[in-house]
Amino acid sequence: MNPEKNYRVNKKFFEKDALEVAPDLLGKFLVVKRNEPLKKYKITEVEVYRGEEDEACHAKKGKTKRNEIMYCSGGHLYVYLIYGMYWMLNIVTGKPGHPQAVLIRSLEGLEGPGKVTKYLGINKSYYGENLAVSNRIWIENNKENAGYTTLKRIGIDYAGEYWKNKLWRYVLIKKN
DNA sequence: AGCAAGATCGGT
DNA sequence: CCGATCTTGCTG
């Protein structure tokens, strides 16, 4: 009997559309196994990048060596370096051939996508990792229901107004 | 082969 | 507001 198995989010969860997965990720736990003891970090802010038509999405110009994992089935990790310094942690969602991913922007007490990866030690070696089966990173369910707000995405001035204005950033409402 | 840009962050 | 820092992808 492996207790971990009862809590890990399965493959099916990630194979839904990014716009459905993103809000459902809020409140759940990101678990990274490095040095014991195992720690769980509550996901508090995520952002959706969805499809080749999305001007802000890395798949906007089709498949490349960097973004090819986005064309795979949901549950894989899309990790890339930005500004030569910060790793961005994304969870691929949806079905194969429909490039989309959810960026993990903040964890409880750890705000900022660059800080999340730096603190957790996420780097290129996590590219393509499968959250459904990996033994060093996965997502765990949380029973508490999560209220959230939607906002515009950050840092995508290069995308046109239409895509810039999409309310594809999801933030967990803090409870007092 | 060369170059511009980038889903960020911390310090002025 | 500005610089750090380097991989990627586009151009020639």
Image: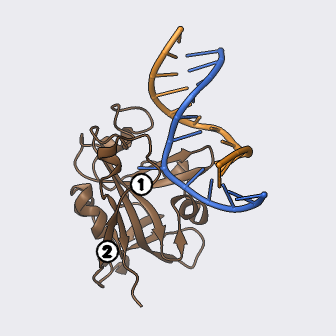
Chain colours: A brown, B blue, C orange
User: Where's residue A80, x and y in %?
Assistant: 50, 46
Residue A23 falls left or right of residue A134: left
User: Where's residue A139, x and y in %?
Assistant: 38, 69
Figure quadrant of residue A157? top left
Q: Quadrant of the C terminus of chain A?
A: bottom left
Q: Residue at horizontal 28%, vertical 69%?
A: A24
User: Is residue A9 something one can see in this rendering?
Assistant: no
Residue A66 or residue A2, whichever sits in front: A66
Cβ atoms under marks 2 and 1 closer than 8 Å: no
The residue carrying pointer 2 sits among few (fewer than 14), some (14 to 19) or many (20 or more) residues within 10 Å by Cα, namely some
**Distance from label 2 to label 1 (Cα)?**
19 Å
The residue beneath circle 2 is A148
Please, which chain is the residue tagged with disc 2 on? A
The residue carrying pointer 1 sits among few (fewer than 14), some (14 to 19) or many (20 or more) residues within 10 Å by Cα, namely many
Please, which chain is the residue tagged with disc 1 on? A
Of all residues, the one furthest to the bottom in this rendering is: A176
User: Where's residue A54, x and y in %?
Assistant: 30, 42
User: Where's residue A37, x and y in %?
Assistant: 56, 79
Kindly state the secondary structure of the residue where label 2 is placed: strand
Q: Quadrant of the N terminus of chain A?
A: bottom left
Residue type, label 1: Asn
**Res. A90 mark:** 1
